[in-house]
Image (tube, coloured by chain):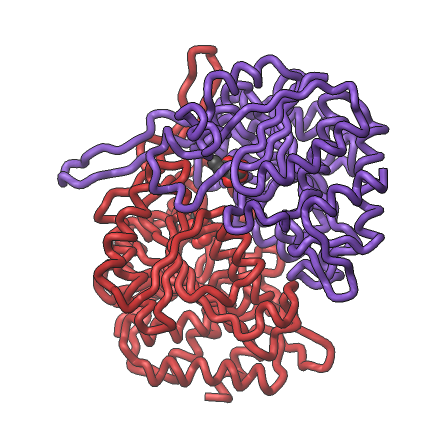
Chain colours: A purple, B red
């Protein structure tokens, strides 16, 4: 069990620190090695994904990732943006399947801005394609048009095999769940998405036991708010997945609770909380470490096939919630407000 | 006052029919002429935007539009899709500024899936750029890659002047409201959106009395659900606007209530309900005509500068809601369930 620890920026180091305490307890045999990424990579080696960090990523079985990002990131040149480090890692390791579960903890239902009956029992997964689309398509850049003004451009692009592999990932995931896949595209307007829908439909025939439906992205963003419990697995492209997965996370009202896994062709994966680097609260011991701890649980399950250990960690998280422990983001009157470290300790205790 | 009536498909003709009754009453001098569009255009003349329909659109001062669309539209070749007719109209008339207000009717607050305190008093406008982006960018289409597989591709593209004109539209709109503009992009990943942000920032300096903020699209889709009342004018590109505006509409719980305006360089505009063609309930006299009627009010205000008439229509809509009239989509126990025609009649009565 070789694990790279890439804590990154902002609250990343704090929350990953708590997940590491849990790892030491449930899998003391794991070998870990730390490496800088994001702004931490720039500070240490001048690049958001230093060569040594990438080399380590290639060597290990799994990566526990914190978060990358600084304020006003868009004004920094692209090759020096912390987020670029994460994009390069996804591409270099061919981590094409990004699983972002959105589920409701019964204790936290009050934290949602949606009515309890709409989100009670919510349990869906957004499967976001992570290696293609307008994120990586070429050509891209700036040019000057015939009027002499600047133009910015990017290319949205998917090939058949790129859609096929994410389709198979979606149907396989649905088989372990409620056997429903909803593919989200904009096939009525975009050729890229027309190909997406064709391939999804074709691959879907190989999984007759899984129900496949299609929604346009605009309708999907409405349905997610209107009736989210109808969904099981939602599969979509990189750009739409970025948007839909954050919306889905927000349904639960507790983005500080949600883990994610980015998987490739083998069992190697990158595991990270859905939340960002939150520079405004970094270093104050107030961030919620449960998303990082639940990301570790996903790692134990997906990369190491340690289903029992994964369950133990997930149950420990449920236990501390039942015991009333809450970080500030999920605090409600009548519960016990704790900091990052105390929350991590409570999970260790529950284990 | 020359107005083209393009009722389109599905429930379009029914709801537009009610708006026409209102028009006859408040502006009997208006000259109207009908023309087929969408599937109706294909049925009548073999094209979603027949030449005669486009010629009429060029001649008139304003277009009252119903809705276009059929089931399984994505499987039809693009040039024969009903939605293509609408896209062609937007492009041919340079209707680049799509205003989609999302506001809460106090009587309908129960219809939202969000908690009342989150959406009570909600009043925002999504301003969606409507002539550029990946919707219209070239090159686009299908090609074969080096592995011999098919690839679908589209081009996301914005020029400085395209962003400038929508930026000015946003700041001008904000001056008539609460003087806040939030520009939504993905400048951390896409060059197109980096240009967008640069130009927004530059144009913003000409409006020092308007507060400008920026959000990435993923954060915006979260904030819209978390704290929608913070927003006044949200300005964004064609693709992100398609998604965000439907999400914003859904916040109100009553998409059957919301109007929109697509404006160009002069006062000519296209006015349409935000809802789609809803083929499943077409022809049954159950659709909600209030969005079409409120779209007419927007037309009176924007294309004809008849602010008083616009207010009268809007007040009549408020009156019928206060009187308890409800179509099926907004029905709640204790109110009076009516059909499309009866709702239209009630508005006429209130006027
Ligand atoms: C940091 C950024 C590049 C990234 C993305 O857009 O993919 C983030 O928003 C995410 O969703 O992981
Ligand atoms: C019908 C379709 C082409 C259209 C769009 O995507 O713009 C619709 O969804 C809209 O938002 O008006």
- Is residue A334 visible to us here? yes
Where in the figure is residue A303, as x and y percent of width and height? 71, 22
**Camera-nearest residue between A108 and B53:** A108
Where in the figure is residue A157, as x and y percent of width and height? 44, 28
**Camera-nearest residue between A350 and A192:** A350
Q: Tell me: residue A272, above or below residue B348.
A: above
In the image, B237: left or right of B321?
Answer: left
Where in the figure is residue B144, as x and y percent of width and height? 42, 17
Q: Tell me: residue A92, above or below residue B215.
A: above
Q: Write the residue at 63% across / 71% down.
A: B116
Q: Write the residue at 62% across / 55% down.
A: A225
Q: Write the residue at 67% across / 38% down.
A: A292
Q: Kindly indicate the quadrant of the structure image that contains residue A344.
A: top right
- Is residue A219 visible to us here? no
Where in the figure is residue B157, as x and y percent of width and height? 31, 39
Tally of numbered discs: 0
Q: Tell me: residue B253, above or below residue B40.
A: below
**Camera-nearest residue between B163 and A209:** B163
**Camera-nearest residue between A96 and A210:** A96
Q: Kindly indicate the quadrant of the structure image that contains residue A25.
A: top right
The quadrant the N terminus of chain B occupies is bottom left
The quadrant the C terminus of chain B occupies is bottom left
In the image, A78: left or right of A306?
Answer: left
């Amino acid at each position: 069990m070789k694990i790279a620890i890439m804590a990154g920026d902002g609250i990343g180091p704090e929350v990953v620190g708590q997940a590491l305490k849990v790892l030491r307890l449930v899998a003391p045999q794991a070998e870990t090695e730390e490496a800088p990424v994001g702004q931490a990579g720039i500070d240490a080696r001048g690049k958001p994904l230093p060569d040594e960090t990438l080399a380590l990523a290639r060597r290990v079985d799994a990566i526990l990732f914190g978060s990358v990002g600084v304020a006003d990131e868009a004004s920094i040149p692209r090759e020096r943006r912390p987020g670029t480090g994460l994009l390069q890692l996804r591409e270099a390791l061919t981590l094409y399947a990004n699983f972002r579960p959105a589920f409701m903890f019964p204790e936290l239902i009050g934290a949602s801005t949606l009515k309890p009956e709409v989100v009670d029992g919510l349990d869906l997964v957004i499967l976001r394609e992570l290696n293609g689309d307008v994120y990586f398509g070429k050509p891209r850049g700036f040019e000057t048009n015939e009027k002499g003004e600047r133009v910015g451009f990017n290319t949205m692009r998917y090939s058949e095999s790129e859609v096929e592999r994410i389709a198979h990932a979606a149907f396989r995931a649905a088989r372990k769940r409620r056997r429903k896949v909803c593919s989200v595209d904009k096939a009525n307007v975009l050729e890229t998405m027309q190909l997406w829908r064709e391939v999804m439909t074709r691959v879907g025939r190989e999984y007759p036991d899984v129900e496949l439906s299609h929604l346009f992205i605009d309708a999907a963003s409405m349905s997610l708010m209107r009736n989210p419990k109808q969904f099981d697995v939602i599969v979509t492209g990189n750009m739409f997945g970025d948007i839909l997965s954050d919306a889905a996370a927000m349904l639960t009202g507790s983005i500080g609770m949600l883990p994610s896994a980015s998987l490739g062709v083998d069992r190697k994966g990158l595991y990270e909380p859905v939340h960002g680097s939150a520079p405004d609260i970094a270093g104050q011991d107030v961030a919620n470490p449960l998303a990082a701890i639940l990301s570790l649980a996903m790692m134990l399950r997906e990369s190491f096939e340690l289903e029992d250990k994964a369950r133990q960690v997930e149950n420990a998280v449920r236990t501390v919630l039942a015991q009333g422990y809450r970080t500030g983001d999920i605090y409600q009157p009548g519960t016990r407000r704790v900091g990052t470290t105390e929350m991590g300790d409570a999970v260790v205790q529950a284990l």
